[in-house]
Amino acid sequence: MNWDQIKGNWQQATGKAMAQWGRLTDDDMKVIAGRRDELTGKLQERYGIAKEEAEKQLAEWERKASSWFKKS
């Protein structure tokens, strides 16, 4: 999944991210605004994890995203 596709569908991705990481807030999602580095930072902040772990979780989430935005 290309991050540009996630960013372009950020409204839909927001719900998926909040379902995956329940500690993220609506305000967090507004700050993140589709920026991958911001999401990584918020994951570190909210979950107290290292950058490497945040990147690992985000990469797995991105792999799942390939099925979310397929055209009918």
Image: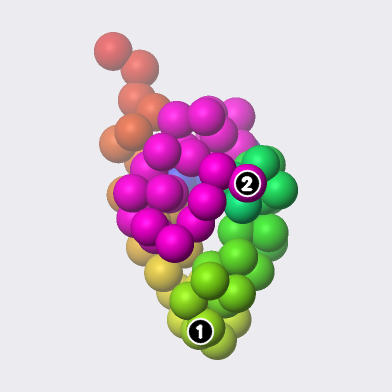
Local packing at callout 1 (Cα closer than 10 Å; few below 14, some 14-19, many 20+) is some
x 52%, y 51%: residue: 25
> Which of the image's four quarters has the N terminus?
top left
- As helix, strand or loop, the secondary structure at mark 2 comes to helix
Q: Residue placed at 68% from the left, 59% from the top?
A: 38
- The location of residue 72, given as percent across then percent down, is 28, 13
Q: Position of residue 51 (x, y in %)?
A: 59, 81
Task: Answer whether labels 2 and 1 touch (C-beta < 8 Å).
Answer: no
* Amino acid type of the residue that numbered disc 2 sits on in the rendered structure: Asp
Q: What residue is drawn where x is 39% and y is 59%?
A: 21
Q: Which residue is mark 1?
A: 49
Q: Position of residue 2 (x, y in %)?
A: 53, 44
Where is residue 52, by image quadrant?
Answer: bottom right
Q: What element does badge 1 sit on?
A: loop
Magenta region, residue range = 5-27
Q: Earlier in the sequence, mark 2 or mark 1?
A: 2
Left or right: 1, with 63 as reference point? right
In the displayed structure, 55 sits above or below 28; it is below
Q: Which residue is mark 2?
A: 27
Q: Could you tell me if residue 17 is visible in this image?
A: yes
Relative to 7, residue 37 above or below: below
- Front of the two marks 2 and 1: 2
Q: Is residue 29 above or below residue 69?
A: below
Q: Residues within 10 Å of mark 2 (few under 14, many from 20)?
A: few
Dominant secondary structure (helix, strand or loop) of the stretch shown in magenta: helix
Q: Residue at horizontal 39%, vertical 28%?
A: 69
Please say if 7 is above or below 36: above
Please state which of residues 15 and 69 is positioned toward the viewer in this rendering.
15
Q: Is residue 52 something that shows in the picture?
A: no
Rounded to the nearest angstrom, the CA distance separating label 2 from label 1 is 20 Å
Asked whether, in this view, residue 47 is left or right of residue 65, the answer is right
